[in-house]
């Protein structure tokens, strides 16, 4: 259903919603995703408020969602059940971390580090702590002939990842496995060529001070990284030599102030070509390392 609404009416509605609270970026996200009115169209309306705009949902419906968001602090992504991420519409709900835009860069780092499949055998890849399954799906598109694994410990996240991974995937294969980090992949140890992870990395004291919209609703298991934020990253780094194929890459997201510590963990674990990568703000938020090759070859 498409509804025609006067531009003045929509702009007045938007102002009234913001007077009640919340951020303009969040409200505009709701207008875009649920109403079908993107940021550029809003800018055009400001210049020509007399024109008519098409809405996919009635303003009363959007207002109900916004009101619940303000009164409960529940994330808008949970209320609408979808989070656009890269070129995907990821289904999300309570118990699943909402995909962040910066995490998209992990996929781009994978593209740089392992730009193509170089052998006749399918490339093997994994996403440790898959949550919604967003990274696993993106990697399936990046490597068309690959065979992928998505590992998750949480029962709730497993159910949500299963929903997302049931979506048609024309490129690649993704197999969902339950357990902690490398453990469910024992039958693939020594064969994984690209492994990504966005593990819990927020120090407990910082997690406790997060905004209620994050702390009270998004799963602690996906955010709280322990006293120094490195509990999960230590475990992942420690298993890298065993899990990766010779020449295989491990790519991690981490907290904004953990770069040196994470690089040290990767080096201590025996990885080489260890490097830091910047986010869109120029902050080192990602790390990569490679398992040494055997006699300069990628074979075991």
Image (spheres, grey):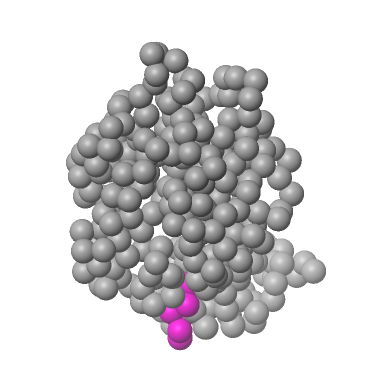
Q: Which x, y percent locates residue 177? A: 57, 54
Q: Which x, y percent locates residue 272? A: 30, 27
Q: Is residue 25 above or below residue 14?
A: above
**Residue 300 shows up from this direction:** yes
Q: Which residues are magenta?
A: 70-77
Q: Which x, y percent locates residue 127? A: 50, 47
Q: Residue at x 75, y 70 (%)?
A: 3
Q: Is residue 249 above or below residue 200?
A: above
Q: Is residue 247 above or below residue 5?
A: above
Front residue of this view, candidates 27 and 224: 224
| Image-quadrant location for residue 116 | top right
Q: Residue at x 45, y 84 (%)?
A: 72
Q: Is residue 79 above or below residue 275?
A: below
Front residue of this view, candidates 123 and 260: 123
* Residue 75 lies in the magenta-colored region: yes
- Taking the view exactly as shown, the residue that stands out farthest to the right is 1
| Image-quadrant location for residue 166 | bottom right
**Residue 278 shows up from this direction:** no
Q: Residue at x 36, y 35 (%)?
A: 241
Q: Which x, y percent locates residue 155? A: 54, 69
| Image-quadrant location for residue 118 | top right
* Residue 112 lies in the magenta-colored region: no
């Amino acid at each position: 259903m498409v509804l025609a609404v006067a531009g003045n009416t929509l702009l007045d509605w938007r102002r009234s919603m913001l007077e009640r609270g919340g951020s303009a970026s969040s409200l505009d996200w709701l207008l875009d995703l649920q109403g079908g009115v993107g940021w550029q169209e809003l800018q055009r309306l400001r210049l020509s408020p007399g024109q008519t705009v098409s809405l996919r949902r009635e303003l009363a419906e959007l207002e109900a969602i916004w009101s619940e968001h303000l009164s409960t602090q529940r994330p808008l992504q949970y209320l609408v059940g979808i989070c656009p991420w890269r070129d995907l519409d990821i289904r999300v709900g309570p118990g699943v971390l909402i995909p962040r835009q910066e995490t998209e860069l992990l996929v781009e780092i994978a593209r740089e580090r392992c730009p193509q499949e170089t052998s006749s055998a399918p490339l093997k890849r994994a996403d440790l702590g898959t949550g919604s399954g967003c990274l696993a799906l993106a990697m399936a598109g990046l490597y068309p002939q690959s065979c992928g694994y998505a590992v998750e410990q949480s029962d709730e996240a497993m159910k949500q990842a299963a929903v997302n991974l049931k979506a048609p995937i024309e490129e690649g294969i993704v197999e969902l496995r339950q357990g902690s980090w490398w453990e469910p992949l024992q039958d693939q140890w020594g064969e994984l060529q690209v492994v990504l992870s966005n593990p819990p990395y927020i120090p407990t004291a910082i997690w406790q001070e997060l905004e209620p919209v994050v702390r009270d609703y998004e799963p602690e298991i996906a955010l709280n990284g322990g006293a120094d934020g490195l509990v999960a990253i230590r475990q992942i780094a420690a298993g890298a030599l065993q899990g990766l194929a010779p020449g295989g890459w491990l790519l991690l997201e981490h907290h904004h102030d953990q770069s040196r510590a994470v690089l040290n963990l990767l080096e201590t674990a025996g990885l080489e070509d260890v490097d830091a990568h910047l986010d869109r703000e120029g902050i080192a938020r990602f790390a990569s390392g490679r398992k040494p090759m055997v006699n300069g070859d990628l074979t075991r």
